[in-house]
Amino acid sequence: MAVINQPGQYPPSDFQTGLCDCCDDCGTCFYAMCCSLCLGCSIASDLDECCLCGLMWPIRSVYRTRYNINGSMCWDFLAAGCCGLCAICQLKRDIDLRKSQGVF
């Protein structure tokens, strides 16, 4: 029998909500519109990263790698560059969902 995943690794998945599903969590969306820097610091804090990294595209790549989420660095760059608020909201929603599921 072939070993597909190493022990402790997460199976490949997608983000649990779409990039433009901001209405799934209006509080996070409102938070991003009012103070995206604060939301970025919150995300960075959740991931034990530097607060200055919270709004940048590499934090999406770090998160995707940590939880084996499908995607690429190119897509992370485009999502953060073209739809920055949507990208950080999606990331925060996913973190919150993983926390509620006990897998964060």
Image: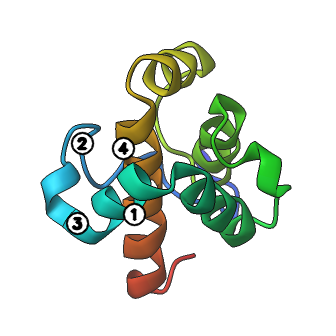
Q: CA distance from mark 3 to mark 1?
A: 10 Å
Q: Quadrant of the C terminus?
A: bottom right
Q: Which numbered mark, 2 or 4, is in the foreground of this view?
A: 2
Question: Left of 45 or right of it: where is 33?
Answer: left
Quadrant housing residue 56: top right
Where is 80 relative to 10, above or below?
A: above
Tell me the mark number nearer the camera, choosing from 3 and 2: 3
Label 1 crowd bin: few (<14), some (14–19), many (20+), radius 10 Å: some
Toward the front, the furthest residue is 34
Furthest toward the left, the residue is 23
Q: Is residue 67 placed above or below 98 in the rendered structure?
A: above
**Gap between marks 2 and 4, in whole Å?**
9 Å
Q: Residues within 10 Å of mark 3 (few under 14, many from 20)?
A: few
Read off the residue under disc 2.
Answer: 18
At mark 4, the secondary structure is loop
Classify mark 3: helix, strand or loop.
helix
Q: Nearer the viewer, residue 32 or 11?
A: 32
Q: Are marks 1 and 4 in contact (CB under 8 Å)?
A: no
Q: Earlier in the sequence, mark 4 or mark 3?
A: 4
Q: Say what secondary structure mark 1 lies in.
A: helix
* Amino acid identity at mark 3: Asp
* Residue situated in front as seen by the camera: 90 or 16: 90
Mark 2, Cα crowd under 10 Å, few <14 / some 14-19 / many 20+, is some
Q: Are marks 2 and 4 in contact (CB under 8 Å)?
A: no
Q: Residue at x 24, y 42 (%)?
A: 18
Q: Which mark is residue 31?
A: 1
Q: Amino acid at mark 1?
A: Tyr
Left or right of residue 16, residue 54 in this image? right
Q: Earlier in the sequence, mark 3 or mark 1?
A: 3
In x, y percent, where is residue 46?
67, 71
Please give the residue where the numbered disc 3 appears in the rendered image. Answer: 25
